[in-house]
């Protein structure tokens, strides 16, 4: 079985501050890990993915995530938040259940001016 | 590349009627498509996996006879909500994975369809 836990359903950051979204996973096989962003009433857009090539993964819009096997974590960061980063972020894992993606509960990011 | 569309983007229907939602991969062939349901302020819940030319595989608790899925071609999957009721009101999102796209089980998502049943 595979599962994903996102710590914190809501995160509030000031514009220009560090964004840190936490994701821990469970998988019985080496996982593929993804971060997606969802804007209101829209589908999901891929931010970045871990596929075992490199533990530090850089994505779009200045986001990056680091895979830490010992901690079973894949936290998402962005050095400086922008107002346009306000959205819902989902961490997902694939691998143990074939093609399926298992999503975390999501973290809503609010950016304060 | 790897664009997925959904139609309609929103639909309002009366209780008891059926609604069909289309999911298309516009620039690649999708051997596998997925249908998700998302309630307000919640995560995505996988409803079913559809493979081109074969029957869909439904997740536990999803009614096969209520949510009919057809994946008749490599670019089109449809979800039909039969005899819709207000509790079926939700945001339905499809995604696609195909041989022409990046591997590692990456899925490309459609923009979603908002269904409201009166």
Image: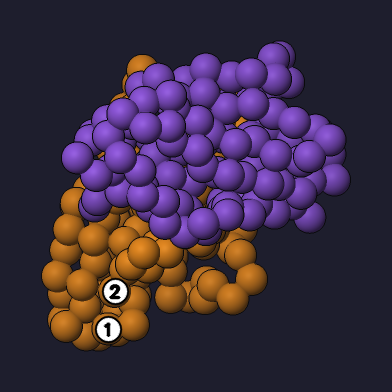
Chain colours: A purple, B orange
According to the image, label 1 marks what residue? B86
The number of numbered discs placed on residues in the rendered structure image is 2
Q: Quadrant of residue A69?
A: top right
Query: Horizontal placement of A19 versus B62: left or right?
Result: left
Q: Position of residue B28 (x, y in %)?
A: 41, 22
Query: Horizontal placement of A102 versus A14: left or right?
Result: right
Disc 1 residue crowd, few under 14, some 14–19, many 20+, Cα 10 Å: some
Toward the top, the furthest residue is A53
Chain letter of disc 1 in the image: B
Image quadrant where one finds the C terminus of chain A: top left
Is B36 drawn above or below residue A25 in the view shown?
below
Q: Is residue A82 visible?
A: yes
Image quadrant where one finds the N terminus of chain A: bottom right
Give the Cα distance between marks 1 and 2. 5 Å
Is B72 drawn above or below residue B115 in the view shown?
above
Task: Find out whether the residues at labels 1 and 2 contact each other: C-beta distance under 8 Å.
Answer: yes
Q: Is mark 1 on a helix, strand or loop?
A: helix
According to the image, label 2 marks what residue? B89
């Amino acid at each position: 079985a595979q599962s994903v836990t996102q710590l914190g359903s809501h995160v509030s950051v000031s514009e220009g501050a560090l964004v840190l979204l936490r994701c821990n996973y469970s998988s019985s096989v080496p996982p593929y890990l993804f971060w997606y962003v969802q804007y209101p009433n829209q589908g999901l857009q891929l931010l970045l993915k871990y596929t075992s090539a490199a533990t530090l993964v850089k994505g779009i819009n200045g986001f990056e995530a680091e895979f830490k096997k010992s901690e079973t974590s894949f936290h998402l960061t962005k050095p400086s938040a922008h107002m346009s980063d306000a959205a819902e972020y989902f961490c997902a894992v694939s691998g143990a259940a074939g093609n399926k993606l298992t999503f975390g509960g999501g973290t809503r990011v609010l950016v304060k001016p | 590349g790897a664009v997925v569309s959904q139609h309609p983007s929103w639909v309002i229907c009366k209780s008891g009627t059926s609604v069909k939602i289309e999911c298309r991969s516009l620039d690649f062939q999708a051997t596998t498509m997925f249908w998700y349901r998302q309630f307000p302020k919640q995560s995505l819940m996988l409803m079913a996996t559809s493979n081109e030319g074969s029957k869909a595989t439904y997740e536990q608790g999803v009614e096969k006879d209520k949510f009919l899925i057809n994946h008749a071609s490599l670019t089109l999957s449809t979800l039909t909500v039969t005899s819709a009721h207000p509790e079926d009101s939700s945001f339905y999102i499809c995604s696609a994975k195909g041989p022409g796209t990046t591997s590692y089980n990456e899925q490309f998502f459609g923009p979603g369809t908002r269904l409201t049943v009166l």
